[in-house]
Image (cartoon, rainbow, N blue to C red):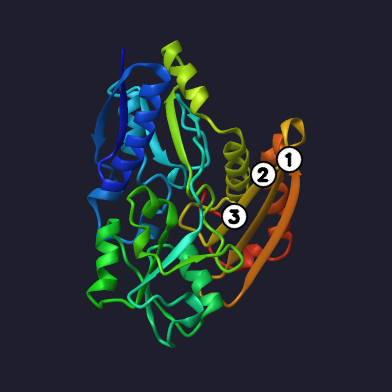
């Protein structure tokens, strides 16, 4: 059997899918064929992501390739996946997560707190923009889209003073040399699921050897952490373009595993922020995320930004 793996056609998507393909070849002993799919988000690079609703814009076409039988599995950046289950599909594996932090890229090695007043910082993420403005209201945040090289070029050619990107993507592309600062979660919480990959397959009629390989690829601690983060997002009814940050860590061993989750909701202009934390059993990660979301809502999160009502 040849495993057909569907992925977006961008360089980053192809690179991270290649890592999954290599692991599956080793685990299953089967060949893996890469099926490139162009998503709506990739085809339209001029429209801000928030205009799409931010939900599923990069995954729908890839999922459809699996549902139509043109591929056996799909690999996604987990932060791009809507929190609602997709009919006919299941997330069969979440491999070990990369460092989920955001990073700042500048020409001169400056950090968020040492950028000059009025510096132009590029990001296409309302979450990043809101947290940047909360820390540095004197910055000018500029919307920017495109692949990693395109966004890095806005700094090297002087269009922008800095851009904020996910460290995981740069690590997978071997471009960490461009990083000026890895932004700690105390300053900027990552997106729920950031740094993690999701491998989806159909929920019926899946080859047994493939299922065994996917189970071996799954990392239990990563799954617990991102499950808590995405449960928070789902309870807030916030899409992936909303200014919601979440970061969970897992500690302990065996049945004593604990998940510690921190989340925040920030107004789009950065002037108001609610940040809370909670710890619970990793086996109850969904409940942990829900508990923290309700705490955020009780602390005033609904009035901060257009979070509720944009279901993911």
Callout 1: SS:
loop
Disc assigned to residue 69 = none
Could you tell me how far apart the alpha carbons at marks 1 and 3 are, in whole angstroms? 20 Å
Q: Quadrant of residue 281?
A: top right
* Residue 58: image location, x then y, percent: 35, 45
Q: Is residue 33 above or below residue 7?
A: above
Q: Would you call the spot at circle 1 few (<14 residues within 10 Å), some (14-19), or many (20 or more)?
A: few
Q: Nearer the viewer, mark 2 or mark 3?
A: 2
**Residue labelled with disc 2:** 250
- Could you say which disc has been placed on residue 246 in the image? 3
At which x and y percent is residue 109?
Answer: 40, 75
Q: Are marks 1 and 3 in contact (CB under 8 Å)?
A: no
> Could you tell me how far apart the alpha carbons at marks 1 and 2 are, in whole angstroms?
7 Å
On screen, residue 236 versus residue 125, left or right, reads right
Regarding mark 3 in the picture, which secondary structure is present there? strand
Q: Secondary structure at mark 2?
A: strand
**Residue located beneath label 1 in the image:** 252
Contact flag, marks 1 and 2 (Cβ < 8 Å): yes
Give the CA distance from mark 2 to mark 3.
Answer: 14 Å
Mark 1 or 3, closer to the camera:
1
Residue 307 in view: no
Residue at 25% from the left image edge and 72% from the top image edge = 156
Foreground disc of the pair 1, 2: 1
């Amino acid at each position: 059997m040849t495993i057909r793996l569907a992925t977006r056609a961008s360089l980053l998507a192809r690179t991270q899918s290649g890592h999954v393909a290599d692991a599956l070849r080793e685990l299953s002993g089967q060949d893996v064929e890469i099926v490139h799919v162009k998503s709506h988000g990739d085809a339209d690079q001029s429209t801000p992501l928030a205009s799409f609703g931010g939900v599923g814009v990069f995954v729908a076409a890839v999922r459809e390739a699996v549902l139509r039988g043109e591929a056996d599995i799909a690999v996604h950046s987990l932060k791009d996946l809507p929190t609602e289950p997709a009919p006919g599909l299941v997330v069969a594996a979440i491999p070990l997560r990369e460092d989920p932090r955001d990073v700042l890229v500048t020409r001169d090695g400056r950090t968020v707190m040492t950028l000059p007043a009025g510096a132009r910082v590029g990001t296409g993420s309302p979450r990043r923009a809101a947290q940047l403005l909360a820390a540095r209201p004197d910055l000018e945040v500029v919307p920017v889209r495109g692949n990693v090289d395109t966004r890095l070029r806005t700094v090297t050619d002087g269009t922008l003073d800095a851009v904020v990107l996910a460290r995981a993507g740069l690590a997978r592309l071997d471009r960490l040399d461009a990083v000026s600062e890895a932004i700690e979660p105390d300053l900027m919480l990552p997106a729920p699921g950031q740094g993690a990959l999701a491998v989806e397959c159909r929920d019926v009629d899946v080859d047994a050897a493939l299922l065994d390989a996917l189970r071996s690829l799954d990392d239990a601690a990563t799954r617990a952490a991102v499950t808590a983060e995405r449960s928070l997002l789902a309870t807030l009814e916030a899409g992936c373009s909303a200014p919601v940050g979440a970061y969970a860590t897992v500690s302990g061993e065996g049945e004593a595993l604990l998940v510690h989750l921190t989340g925040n909701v920030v107004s789009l202009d950065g002037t108001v922020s609610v940040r809370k934390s909670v710890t619970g059993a990793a086996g109850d990660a969904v409940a942990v995320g829900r508990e923290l979301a309700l705490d955020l809502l009780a602390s005033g999160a609904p009035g901060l930004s257009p979070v509720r009502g944009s279901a993911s």
